[in-house]
Amino acid sequence: MPDMKVFEYAPAPESRDIARLKPTYGVFVDGQFRPGRGEPVKSINPATEEALAEIQEADASDVNDAVSAARRAYDSGWSKLAGTQRAKYLYRIARVIQERSRELAVLETLDNGKPIRESRDVDVPTAAAHFFDYAGWADKLAYAGFGPNPHPVGVAAQVIPWNFPLLMAAWKIAPALAAGNTVVLKPAETTPLTAMTLAEIIAECELPPGVVNILPGGPSVGQSLVDHPGVDKIAFTGSTAVGKQIQKSVAASGKRLSLELGGKAANIVFDDAPLDQAVEGIVNGIFFNQGHVCCAGSRLLVQESIADVFISALKDRLQTLRLGDPMDKNTDIGAINSAAQLGRIRVLADAGEAEGGQRWSPDCPLPERGFWFPPTIFTDVGPASRIAREEIFGPVLSVLTFRTPQEAVDKANNTPYGLSAGIWTDKGSRILWMANKLRAGVVWANTFNRFDPTSPFGGYTESGFGREGGRHGLEAYLDV
Amino acid sequence: MSDRLDVRKTYKLYIAGAFPRSESGRSYPVSGAGDTVLAHAAQASRKDVRDAVSAARKAFGGWSGATAYNRAQVLYRVAEMMEGRREQFIAEVLAGDGGTRDAAATVVDAAIDRWVWYAGWADKYAQIAGGANPVAGPYFNFSVPEPSGVVGIVAPQQDSLLGLISVIAPALTTGNTVVVLAATDRPLAAITLSEVLATADLPGGVVNVLTGYVAELAPWLASHRDVNCLDLTGVAAADRVPLAVAAADSVKRVHSPGERAGIGLDEPGLARLAAFVEIKTVWHPLGV
């Protein structure tokens, strides 16, 4: 439809004042806000490269303080507190997140670069929902199917990524607290701001000091936290490479571990799929959050008989995506989170071209400042090429074809990962057959990238182990 | 008095449903409780580990794809086959582990009953561990446990039969296939059990049993990239670290139980069933 007349959108920007940015943010330890003892860094807006705030990061001594505070809070009351009381604290947090949702959404978009539409409609409401859902578990643990008298594990060290900063904090903290554990959380170095606002909310909700401690910092802070002997459980979401390191560093130490790592999901389109819906699903699967999604559908497997028609429809749709100011409510594609991530995406995309893939992007001017990568499709991708095998964590889709359902399954499963998969077909028996054969922790049929606090999420093989969400998500935080 | 000579058994490995000698040609003497040499067991090699893993991988599709009811019947059939050889197993446990005949009988009975217990779980565990999830949107959403894949197991070293069965049966119940390193000093009951497995309609390759030196073989099992899970029950706590480190290279699920290992006479609980499954969640929109 490029020759069709398109109505232009008027700008509809959110106001940055709503984020209530502070000039500096420190650590939250033992109920106190104070500067960390590490090197201060600037957190920048990846869409403009302007500094948003100074982060007074943690160092190893702050890790020590935080773990000790978490231990004291665990021993002195939180683990023994009646479940009904823990539940009420979590309900309070859920409600304040809802009340401050616009502030949190704007802050998230400023710090992360994701479109305000996504932080407003997905990240923040789902974060509130996680607290609300797990609040109700806190006084019902004996009914969760892990025995009549389940115990908390102890002090949980939680290390989260930059792609869904507030939501990942909620995924980690809510089940841990519901089960009676105390927490030391390290947000990602490039996106600490919403976690620090969550710390404010936790303080405002009057949780006992030390129950939740939040330490902004880089990889060395994460390593100190994971290695700390006072920690009983580690929950990590991030890259498979770092996940393997963590698994090694806690090997046979008795520390409990859950890992939510990378993915290279196949999104499989059969010739009987409703094509318009499938196009929307593929676009959502790989371009949602600029592709910074571990379960992103980064491999399109399209049935050979419809490949040309489908790819053409997909390209038409990409022409209408709006890339630019993440604060604009009409923006579909925001900024890449950091210069480093942009560099990684470029390297892999260049490798895709070097290995013979055909690269295509819509005619899409990129803003002059900030970190940007256009939505990109690679066709003629060999199954052994890097862009078909390695997680790219960016808005880049590799297209492969198949002829039979068995071939689709074989290609989809031909990866060391196993986090998610998508199926697009009108045939119910085929959906269930495919869902059964695909080796992935989440299978979306005729939909993609749906998340819910009641729905377990997590991977097979090198995508990690353990589940987050729902009844299953409690197991990682209970001594069963 | 008969002057007939008895026919003695050659103890070999159990790989892909067959009983080969070690490809290395090695064997090692196994002594019983009284230091008499009971037999020469095959001393498996790295290559035997790899053959066993590839057999287990090949068998995974069929075993994991079998109906839970079918798996239940096969596991129950193992109990039936063992019951018929009860006296033989008692003699084997007595010779290998020592103790009294009554104690050996108690262990063999518990071992047989453990198959029956786990057989019953095969078509029930998914209902306990899975279910429908009430998501906040117009979707049908459900979760099911699925087998993790190939499970590498180091069997308990002090208990040649009940310990061995307690570690392999739960992995099989949920649809995994198994490569197990039998107790180094007490491997003979494991091979006799393999004869039972071979005649219990358990497809070849679903269980592969290797005898030999655990210290030599376990590192290859731990680092093999086509092994999905590692069960370190039979490894002393002090020796687990290097194996668990090697396992991390392919993000294996490592089961490193403490005291509650589920390998004794008490009812084992669900921990071993839960250790080697993956929860799969499927979403589909509602609509007309």
Image (cartoon, coloured by chain):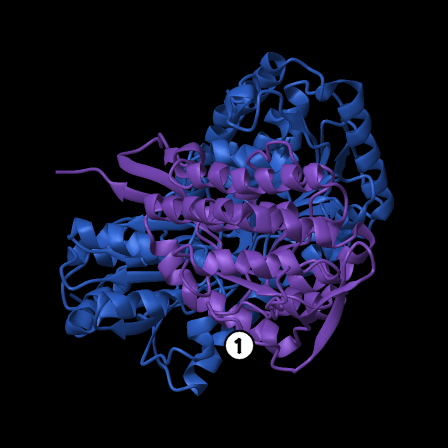
Chain colours: A blue, B purple
**Residue A373 visible in the picture:** no
At 74% across and 50% down in the image, what residue appears?
Answer: B97
Which quadrant is home to the N terminus of chain A? Answer: bottom left
The percent position of residue B220, horizontal first and vertical second, equals 66, 70
Q: Is residue B158 left or right of residue B133?
A: right
Give left or right: position of A49 versus A436.
Answer: right
For the point 52% across and 27% down, the residue is: A131
Q: Amino acid at mark 1?
A: Val
In the displayed structure, A131 sits above or below B86; it is above
- On the rendered image, what quadrant is the C terminus of chain A found in? top right
Q: Nearer the viewer, residue A438 or A422?
A: A438
Residue to which mark 1 is pinned = A347
Q: Is A447 left, or right, of B108 in this rendering?
A: left
Query: Badge 1 sits on which subunit?
Result: A
Quadrant of the image occupied by residue B251: bottom right
* Circle 1: element type: helix
Depth check: B33 or A46 in front?
B33
**Disc 1 crowd, CA 10 A, few/some/many (<14, 14-19, 20+):** few
Position of residue A130 measured from the top left corner of the image (x, y, whole percent): 49, 31
Task: Name the residue: 33% across, 57% down.
Answer: A437
- The picture quadrant where one finds residue A265 is bottom left
Q: Residue at x 77, y 40 (%)?
A: A231
Residue A40 x, y percent position in the rendering: 78, 50
- Determine whether A287 is above or below A72 in the image: below
